[in-house]
Amino acid sequence: MKQVIEDEAATIELDRIIEFYEVDPEGKDWEDSKKRLLSAIMKGRITLDEESGVVIMELVSPIKLQNDDIVKSLEFREPTAGDLKVLDKYKESESMAKTIHLASKITSKSIAIIEKMIGRDLSTMGAITSLFF
C-alpha cells in the first residue's frame, strides 16, 4: 500500500491516539510499535473513532470466512480487567498466544479469525495492543 497521509499528519494522529488512551510511551518495545503504527496511519489503515472509543484497523489482506463473508477491518476497544485476566493462563514464553487471545477479546472476533491474519496485519495488531500497556 502506498502512503496516503503525510508524515506530519500521521504523527499528529498518533499523538491524538496516545493522548486518548493516556499512553505513557517509552522503551524500545514502544519505539518499534510507534514505527509500525505511524507506517499504518500513513497508509490510511489506522484511525481512531473517539466517539466509540475504538481504533479501527483496515486489513492489508481481508479474511474470507467459511460463509463467504469478508472481514476487511478490525475494531479494537480498550481491554477490561476481565480481558486481561484471561492472559494469566498463558506462560511468559507464550507471548503470541497471549496477543492472539487478547486481540480476539478486544475485537470481538474469534481466535480462528485472528489466526488467519497475515504477518503485516499481525504486526500492526500487536502495535495497537501495545497502546493499552
Image: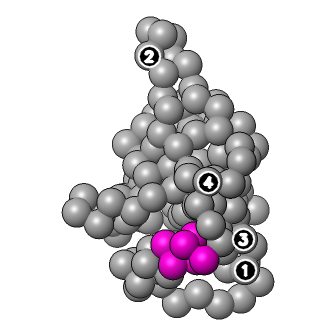
Numbered badge on residue 69: 2
Residue 113 falls left or right of residue 28: left
12 is within the stretch colored magenta = yes
The 10 Å Cα crowd at callout 3, few under 14, some 14 to 19, many 20 or more, is few
Tally of numbered discs: 4
Disc 4 and disc 3 in contact, CB within 8 angstroms: no
Numbered badge on residue 35: 3
* Residue labelled with disc 1: 31
Give the residue type that dot 3 points to: Lys
Mark closer to the chain start, 4 or 2: 4
Query: Which residue range is magenta in the image?
Result: 8-14
Magenta span: chief secondary structure: helix
Give the residue type that dot 2 points to: Asp
Query: Is residue 101 something that shows in the picture?
Result: no
Give the residue type that dot 1 points to: Glu
Mark closer to the chain start, 4 or 3: 4
Q: Where is residue 43 in the image (x, y as percent from the top left)?
A: 63, 53
